[in-house]
Image (cartoon, rainbow, N blue to C red):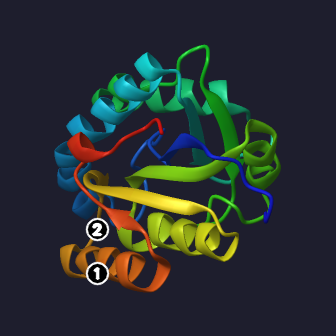
Amino acid sequence: MHDTGDATALVVIDMINTYEHEDAELLLPSVRAALPGVRRLISRARAEGVDVVYVNDNFGRWRSHHQELLDIALDGPHADLVEPVRPDADSLFVLKARHSIFFQTPLEYLLGQLGVGRLVLCGQVTEQCVLYSALDAHIRHVLTVVAPDAVAHIHRDLADAALRMMERNMGTLVTPSSGIALRG
């Protein structure tokens, strides 16, 4: 993706989730802590007319679509973590099967169509999907911003290292959600 535009998109990673997976118990407290930052970014993006793109694991449900995943998560035991960040009618949605938001998804094409050259990443998991997505954005010459208060982790030490790697090795701007400019 070499012909990027100057628009920004907010990418919400894997927040439509049932938390029925290995390490979920370690992840849940961090999701609860990151939820206000994620909500703040989504609210600001919607208010400012910035595209909000949900990129979410399909959880191996190859016949599913985003509404089905949302319904399952909202019917699950952790609906309180999904409801506050649910997609609205204007949100865009991309399903993924692996860690990176780019790997074998139509996201790169979508961003090109939208004229997006800068991504604000939020969601989960910092030391996995967020890190790999920031790397894939970097190799595509897409600028990235990550708000440490709007990303959740399983292991704090790995998340801290991942944020340092994104900043140092990938040129990612790591700054609190309240300090992120979504326009301009």
- At numbered mark 1, what does the secondary structure look like: helix, strand or loop? helix
Q: Which mark is residue 13?
A: none
Residue at mark 1? 158
**Residue 126 point in image, percent of width and height:** 37, 66
Residue at mark 2? 154
Please give left or right for residue 183 compared with residue 133 in the image: left
Which residue sits at x=44%, y=86%? 169
Whether residue 58 can be seen here: no
Please give left or right for residue 179 compared with residue 67 in the image: left
Whether residue 173 can be seen here: yes
Please give left or right for residue 167 compared with residue 93 in the image: left
Question: In this view of the protein, which residue sits in the foreground, 101 or 45?
Answer: 45
Report, in whole angstroms, how far the alpha carbon at label 2 lies from the one at label 1: 8 Å
**Residue 130 point in image, percent of width and height:** 46, 64
**Residue 138 point in image, percent of width and height:** 59, 73
Please, what is the three-letter code of the amino acid marked with disc 2?
Ile
150 relative to 135, above or below: above
Q: Are marks 2 and 1 in contact (CB under 8 Å)?
A: yes
21 relative to 162, above or below: above
